[in-house]
Amino acid sequence: MTVRSASPATIAVIVFILLAMLRLLVFRPESLIVRSTKSIATVRYVIDGDTLDLVDGRRVRLLGIDAPEAGFHGKIAEPWAEESTEWLRDRVEGYEVTLRVDEKEKDRYGRTLAWIFDANGVLINQQILTEGHAKLLSDFGLPADLEPALRQAESRARIQKSGLWGLNRRAKE
């Protein structure tokens, strides 16, 4: 009785099948998908550069950004807080926006965590970074579909010394 060895093509097919099974069993693709819901709402009032109130009563914290604190409850406002707040107010206050809420819907303060799009489909979270009115906040992770654009937006603002990235330069003038 003669035993034939498997051909390279047969071995390749077996390895491919094993890798495909491993991918499906261990590295489940659905775990890479960000589950999100979208809704339309009207902005009633902008509190600061990363927080706003909606007409329906929800308070929303913009994801992926950290704008300078406006200085409430006896605290001193951080540099560029007023400019950041005004920038956001000019773009969304009184307007309808689309909220994309990803998986974790609320933070510890009860605020809805969301990505905000204006009526033209512009991602406000990204645009505020591009203009230099906020810093990227990636401590809690960023969605794979948005991360490259958000990082590029902050990098562009830093390089151009836009908004809060130009504060040191302005202090010297």
Image (cartoon, helix red, strand yellow):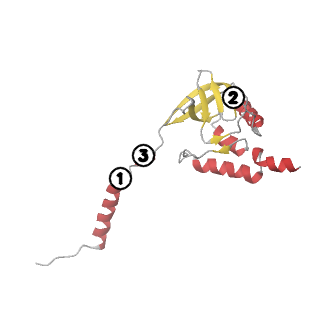
Residue type at the position of mark 2 = Ile
Q: Which residue is mark 3?
A: 31
Decide: is 1 above or below 115: below
Say whether marks 1 and 3 touch (CB < 8 Å): no
Residue type at the position of mark 1 = Val
The secondary structure type at the circle numbered 2 is: strand
Decide: is 129 above or below 118: below
Q: Find the residue positioned furthest to the right.
A: 173
Q: Decide which of tag 1 and tag 3 comes sooner along the chain.
A: 1
Q: x, y (%) of residue 75?
A: 73, 32
Q: Which residue is mark 1?
A: 26
Q: x, y (%) of residue 94?
A: 69, 24
Q: Please state which of the two labelled residues, at mark 2 or mark 3, is closer to the viewer.
A: 2
Side of 11 relative to 93 (left or right): left
**CA distance separating discs 2 and 3:** 34 Å
Q: x, y (%) of residue 3?
A: 16, 76
Which numbered tag is attached to residue 47?
2
Side of 70 relative to 23 (left or right): right
The secondary structure type at the circle numbered 1 is: loop
Decide: is 135 above or below 20: above
The secondary structure type at the circle numbered 3 is: helix
